[in-house]
Image (cartoon, helix red, strand yellow):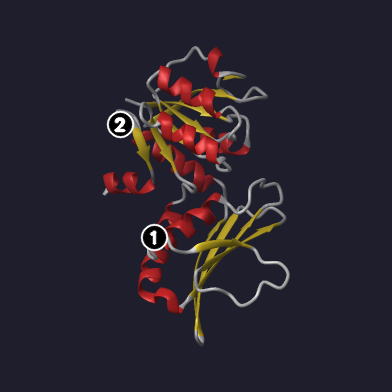
Amino acid sequence: MSVRIIICGACGKMGGNVLSLLENDPEATAVCGVDLYPKEIGIPVYASFADIKEEADVIIDFSSPIGLTERLEYAKTHKLGIVLASTGFSAEDLKTIDNYSKEVAIFKTANLSLGVNLMQALIKAAAEVLGDSYDVEIIERHHNLKKDAPSGTALMLADTINEAFDNQKQYVNGRDGIVGAREKSEIGIHAVRGGTIVGEHEVMFAGEDEIITISHSARSKRIFAVGAIRAAKFLPQKQAGMYEMKDLLAEEK
């Protein structure tokens, strides 16, 4: 049976990408959307989850942290899974998400790209092999409209590397002024904003007389929509809890 999807942020660019991909997907369909500014996009779009009339199996959320509790409460009440595809969540938001995961199947990842998740595995292996003899710096680049910095993906990559060091590394977001010599305990994270860059992430391992760089460049936002739909197909019938891309990939093997 086709997975029935509610698109939150349906009238935005990512909502449009999801809707476009679902038009030719025999395994999933968009039954309606929710958006603060509803408009005609070919499916019913509501300003609030309270107005929804259609039945669904899962929510894909490409909106923003604003209204997070409303979405999670709807998922809980209607026993739906929810794919949280946006970033920029506050510490309080993350606590709310964790609390709802006790009763809702939640798929949350900082990046839905298969390539970025492969990159995670590569940088973790590199960190384990290279150890403290190499300095780690992360550079992320995004378009000039992105509101949060550093990106959620950059922080995810930093966390992945930090696991190899028993979470003993400290994150330094950019550097300014006379900061002194670089400490071995640092992972530097640098944010670049400009133009229409979709998303680029580079992890540099700088050692004595050599540099190893592992990078990923997104050329279109459609890759994130593809990942979100895969996650939406994965969630129905899952028990309450937190899920991420590695869970999906393990099941698809």
Amino acid type, residue under disc 2 in the picture: Lys
| Residue 238 circle label | 2
In front of the other: 157 or 98: 98
Q: Which residue is mark 1?
A: 163
How packed mark 2 is, by other alpha carbons closer than 10 Å (few <14, some 14-19, many 20 or more), is: few
Question: Whole-percent x and y of residue 223?
Answer: 50, 48
| Residue 175 circle label | none
Circles 2, 1 touching at the beta carbon (< 8 Å): no
Residue under the image location 50 percent in, 41 percent down: 225
Amino acid type, residue under disc 1 in the picture: Glu
Task: Tell me which label, 2 or 1, sits earlier in the chain.
Answer: 1
Give the secondary structure at mark 2.
loop
Asked whether residue 220 appears in the rendered view, the answer is yes
Does residue 11 lie above or below 144 as drawn?
A: above
Does residue 212 lie above or below 6 as drawn?
A: below
Residue under the image location 34 percent in, 36 percent down: 234
Question: Whole-percent x and y of residue 195?
Answer: 72, 55
How packed mark 1 is, by other alpha carbons closer than 10 Å (few <14, some 14-19, many 20 or more), is: some
